[in-house]
Amino acid sequence: MKRRRTIFGNAIYGLAGLAGLTLCGVCPLQAQAAETLLRVAVYENLDYPLNIFDKNHVLVGGLQKDFTDQLAKKLSTPVSYAAYSRRRIESVVIQGDADIMCYSSPGWFDLPKEVSWTVATFPQVERVVVMADKTSVEMVPQQLEGKKVVLQLGYHYPQIASQLTEGKIKRVDLTDVPGMFRLLALGGADAMVSSDGEIEGYFKNFPEKRSLYKVSKTPFSVVHTQCALSHKSAWKLEQINAAIQFLQESGEMERIMRKYGLSMR
């Protein structure tokens, strides 16, 4: 079992704030926000720019934290984070051990009806990566048939699902993106599939490696990700959606994407 690590966002309650809550006897939503922690589950295997972990694997930054920090700020509540494996994170939210997880999609969940889904948040664009001396893969699945493709363990790939089942494409599973790049360089696979964010995160950490690889111009997939809210959470879907829509309309979500070299479009 993976060790669970949690960090808590700062929450400061002054005397003036307490007095305001006491006077606001007809404001149940504000009272709930002040008393209810927003517990966020994140993928432990996703690194920059989605997650930034310190040397103790405590979440200290990244697109997901910046977004949910702002979400919690709009909800006027403290926030905590816990990292989970891909195999555990879905059940954690369903069982109510976390309130919410973001950068997800009903198509990625085994039991999508067991949670509530918010409005769309950030787009996830996946691309195919090959070695620089190979032919680019711009047509899926045709150009992947007969090849070994390294994919992330536990992830669903509906675009090539039938080819994987029929053995026309051989799947090689790994848990981390740097490992996928290394396997590709060693000849253990012909291609890999990963998101723009994770690809750029790898090249940010290893800029000297960029020239060794070729990234497809044509997306492998585009998914408008959402947040999954536990049915057992004290938070209501309407509250979360209203906060997300505020962050969209205020330009905050676009600002967060630009901060990490990504775009909403």
Image (cartoon, rainbow, N blue to C red):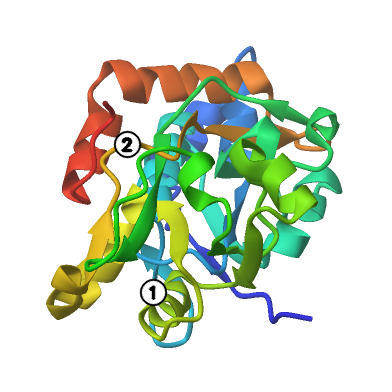
In the foreground, 161 or 178: 161
Classify residue 199 by image quadrant.
Answer: bottom left
What is the CA distance from the residue labelled 2 to the residue labelled 1? Answer: 19 Å
Q: What residue type is labelled 2?
A: Thr
Report the residue at 46% width, 73% height from top. Answer: 180
Residue 172 visible within the image: yes
Give the residue furthest to the front: 146
Report the residue at 22% width, 66% height from top. Answer: 132
Classify residue 121 by image quadrant.
Answer: top left
Location of residue 202 with respect to 252 vertically, above or below: below
Q: Which of marks 2 and 1 is nearer the N terminus?
A: 1
Residue 97 visible within the image: no
Q: Does 48 sit left or right of 35 as displayed?
A: left
Where's the C terminus, which quadrant? top left
Report the residue at 62% width, 70% height from top. Answer: 172
In the foreground, 46 or 211: 211
Q: What residue type is labelled 1?
A: Phe
Q: Position of residue 228 (x, y in %)?
A: 66, 36
Residue that badge 2 annotates: 218
Location of residue 107 with respect to 180 vertically, above or below: above
Q: Does 136 sit left or right of 161 as displayed?
A: left
**Numbered badge on residue 181:** 1
Q: Does 40 sit left or right of 74 as displayed?
A: right
Report the residue at 60% width, 37% height from top. Answer: 159
Neighbor class of circle 1 (other Cα within 10 Å; few <14, some 14-19, many 20+) is: many
In the foreground, 123 or 165: 165
